[in-house]
Amino acid sequence: MADGSGSTMTLDAPVDGSLVDGLKSFAGDHGGAKAVIEYVGRRGARIVLVGEDGAWGDQFAPSTDIARSACIQAGIAVENQWERELIEQMRPNNDLWRSMGRRSLAR
């Protein structure tokens, strides 16, 4: 599809290999994973990963399209929204609880 400038647009956004590798690594370390992609404005998109063992982490991508493509390339299922079962599967560690406590106190 042409954009009028003589160049063509592609529907497949380029994905950084290190992002895909990071997603694959997380899934491998935690018995598989599911992802929820959250739009975070100009910063792009946050990929929240929930491992089968309850561990969770996140990665950032320049856009939601790139985030979705990276998850597909890494073999990680993307959930459309936060479902109760996925939230209940998450097991925050003590470091996370401490950092969350500091954030609420700082506000």
Image (cartoon, grey):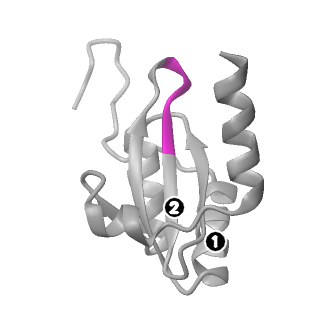
Inter-mark Cα distance, 2 to 1 = 8 Å
Q: Position of residue 39 (x, y in %)?
A: 40, 32
- Secondary structure type for disc 2: strand
In this view of the protein, which residue sits in the foreground, 103 or 47?
103
**107 horizontally vs 68: left or right:** right
Q: Nearer the viewer, residue 83 or 8?
A: 83
Q: Which residues are magenta?
A: 42-46
Which quarter of the rendering shows the C terminus? Answer: top right
* x and y, in percent, of residue 55 in the image: 60, 70
Tell me the residue at 38%/24% (across/down).
Answer: 7
Q: Which is more toward the observer, 101 or 31?
A: 101
Side of 48 relative to 82 (left or right): right
Residue 42 % position (x, y): 50, 18
Amino acid beneath label 1: Phe
Which residue is under mark 2?
49
Residue lying at 62% horizontally and 50% vertically, measured from the top left: 16
Which quadrant of the structure image shows residue 38? top left
Amino acid residing under circle 2: Leu
Nearer-N-terminus badge (2/1): 1
Label ID, residue 96:
none
Q: Which mark is residue 26?
A: 1
Task: Say if mark 2 contacts mark 1, CB within 8 Å.
Answer: yes
Query: In the rendered image, is residue 77 in sight?
Result: no
